[in-house]
Image (cartoon, rainbow, N blue to C red):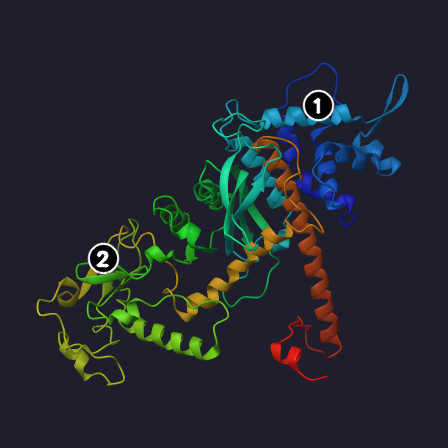
Amino acid sequence: MSIPLAVIEEIIDASGIAEQIEGLLPYAVRDRQLTARTLLVGMHLTLDDGRPAHLTRVRQALISLPGPDQERLGVTMTWKTGPHQLTYRQVEHTHRLITKALGKQQPDGAPSGALQSACDTLLEASIPDELKHASTALAGDWTDVETWSRPPRHGDTQCADREASWGHRNSNLPGPRGEMFFGYYLSLAVMTREENGPPVPELARRMTAASCNHDPVRALVPVLAKLPAAGIPLGDFLADSGYAHRDAAAWAIPMRKAGAQLIQDLHPADRGPRGTHHGAIIANGCLYCPATPAPLLALGPLPPGAPAEDTTAHDQQTAELARYKLPRHTSDDTDGYHRLTCPATAGKIRCPLRPQSMTLDRDRPEILSPPQHPPACCTQQTLTVPPSVAAKTRQKHDYPSAAWRRSYTRRTSAERANSTIKNTATTSIARGWIRLLGVTPIMLWLTCALATRNQRILTAHDARQEDNARRAAAGLPPRTRKRRRTTLAQLTAPP
């Protein structure tokens, strides 16, 4: 057991989830030997030991504890007939009561409010107090969770898990890049470092699970929107094009309303020019001068592993594009409106329509062919932009600039979180990991798995910090990760 029992109990007690669940359970004449607190302890012990999420493994983990701990947790009690040790039927009974209390009367594949609240408090309690405000930046991603039930037969809708449904997942195996699966979507929000800030442990802060009939993006938004009310301010939120491609009312607008600053990759269908606003070209979430060169507006993000010379050329082009961007004249007001000004008025380019700009140095771009009938963006000093303009694609940094690229690299923390809970060496959530059906038990077990994973991340982070401090005291630089890569030149070199 890598995580001490005292740490597991401290997390459960700090969350208050055990008292919350006990308050929802029905009253019984006879006291239950297994309490909700002890069951949660057994679930954490099971997952920490790399065991699958089976109730039989929960009982094995609890009866493997030392005798004093078994008596303290109620695993072993003294009955009239003598000492009585916890049975599997008692584990199953308590788990069934909890599942029924946290579930919906009419299951629809989405978690109930009580279940989501319990999972939020448990996951938040797994983060130490000294790290709760280490960073306000989060990275989001979703992944597949396959149910134990067989999917319904062709032409039928009945199966053992009536809340599960068909979904799509990407695959890195040879052949097609995607495949169908039957189960649920797990959505994660993982802590990541601030821009230009020190590294922080990549801890899972919020999660939710729902049937594939429910959009994972729309399922995660209300969970994140509750963070400010819980005293957790929202800062940067990094997301891929799967989030950015959703309707603005489903993702971008409620996230901005909650205080988040979006840093996201744009879907290919959302890139480039997408209409105009009073003559200004709307492209990649920004407004540009009507005379902006078309090749600059067509710039896309660099592919992974691009050569240094391509990166340098791309950064020069995005910097040139930024000169044509209409800069902000005011910040957003309470209704989301703001004002922009002409780039020539701001001294970024030279334009004959703005005579004062023609006195600027010639190292700035010059508009050689201004519009014959100048639109409002060329004649007015400022331009009012409502929140509906570029609401879907607007973000913190210009897309796809060097600043956006450097900031967006932090999103890999969410992918690493998904990979750790799918690692067969520790806890793998592949099919068969859990044989309970329905979103309620699956989501409760996934929360315990993520809380256990957070403790592993903290242990590795503390060990790394201690090693760096020891090396610094000895006058040595911090340990760097070795790049274990064999090149073609090494493979073809003569012996």
* Residue 249 place in picture, x, y as percent: 34, 44
Query: In the image shown, does 373 or 350 lie closer to the viewer?
Result: 373
Query: In the image shown, does 469 or 413 lie closer to the viewer?
Result: 413
Residue sitting at the far top: 29
Three-letter amino acid code at the position of disc 1: His
In space, the residues marked 1 and 2 are separated at their CA atoms by 60 Å
Closer mark to the observer between disc 1 and disc 2: 2
Crowding around mark 2 (Cα neighbors within 10 Å: few <14, some 14 to 19, many 20+) is: few
Which residue is at a point 88% across and 16% down the rendered structure image?
A: 80
* Residue 457 place in picture, x, y as percent: 67, 55
Number of numbered tags placed on the structure image = 2
Instruction: Tell me if residue 47 comes above or below residue 59 in the rendering.
Output: below
Mark 2 residue element: strand
Is residue 203 visible to the viewer in this orientation of the structure? no
Q: Which residue is mark 1?
A: 93
Residue sitting at the far left: 373
* Residue 255 place in picture, x, y as percent: 41, 48
Q: Which residue is mark 2?
A: 275
With 204 as the anchor, is 6 left or right in this view? right
Instruction: Tell me if residue 305 comes above or below residue 268 in the rendering.
Output: below
